Image: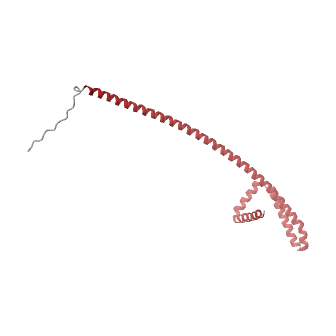
Amino acid sequence: MEKMAEPIEPTTPDATSNPHRAEAKSRFSAALDEAKAGAAALKAEALEKADALKADAKTKATTYKSRAGEKSEQLKGDAAAYGETAKAKATEIAIETKAKTSEALVSLSRLATDNAATLDEKLGVKYGDYARSAARSLESGATKLDTKSIEELGADARDMVRKSPGTAIAVAVGAGYLLARLFRSK
């Protein structure tokens, strides 16, 4: 059997045998320390800039939030003002409509009273009495309408709708149909 050769061990030059090795090692260590210090400085600078940007963003966010809150309050105020104006105008229109309706009921009452005598002559006293009764009812309705405020009329309307919603719907449909016919003819 053949004998195997023994492995050769690498030889490393001795530090005393190579004077430049110690200097290279020293320079490499210094460069490594300098690179670490540079990286630490860059990290500190990046953190400082990040903190500054974060503070700036926070300030801007607070400013925008404040502006949005101010604008929101301004819009709420404007909406409230428009609402009050609309409410005042609606009340004014309702009062005018109430007065005109009352006048129309009184006029219709007078017309029925004036024609009651004619109905007595042509159709009989019974029909004349119906006309006079209708005239009294119309006049009574006009008086009640004059004495009640808009709020009371609104409350009465709500009560009527609660008590008989079917009738309220039928009246609303009928009024809508009449208004549609009225505006279509114009």
Give the colour scheme shown: secondary structure
| Quarter of the C terminus within the rendering | bottom right
Residue sitting at 87 percent across and 65 percent down?
A: 111
| Residue 46 horizontal/vertical position (percent) | 45, 34
Residue drawn 47% across the image and 33% down it: 48
From the viewer's perspective, tell me whether residue 60 is left or right of residue 133.
Answer: left
Of residues 124 and 54, the one drawn nearer to the viewer in this rendering: 54
Please tell me which residue lies in front, 126 or 69: 69
Q: Is residue 165 visible?
A: yes
Q: Residue furthest bottom?
A: 123
Please state the horizontal and vertical placement of residue 53, each as a whole percent of the image: 51, 36
Q: How many marks?
A: 0
Left or right? Give the position of 21 relative to 175: left
Examine the rendering and report whether any part of residue 149 can be seen: no
- Where 8 falls versus 152 (above or below)? above
Q: Quadrant of the N terminus?
A: top left
Residue 58: percent from the left, percent from the top?
Answer: 53, 38
Left or right of 48, for residue 140: right
Give the residue drawn at x 40%, y 31%.
Answer: 38
Q: Quadrant of residue 108?
A: bottom right
Q: Quadrant of residue 66?
A: top right
10 to 137, vertically: above or below: above
User: Is residue 164 rendered to the left or right of residue 3?
Assistant: right
Residue 134 or residue 102, whichever sits in front: 102
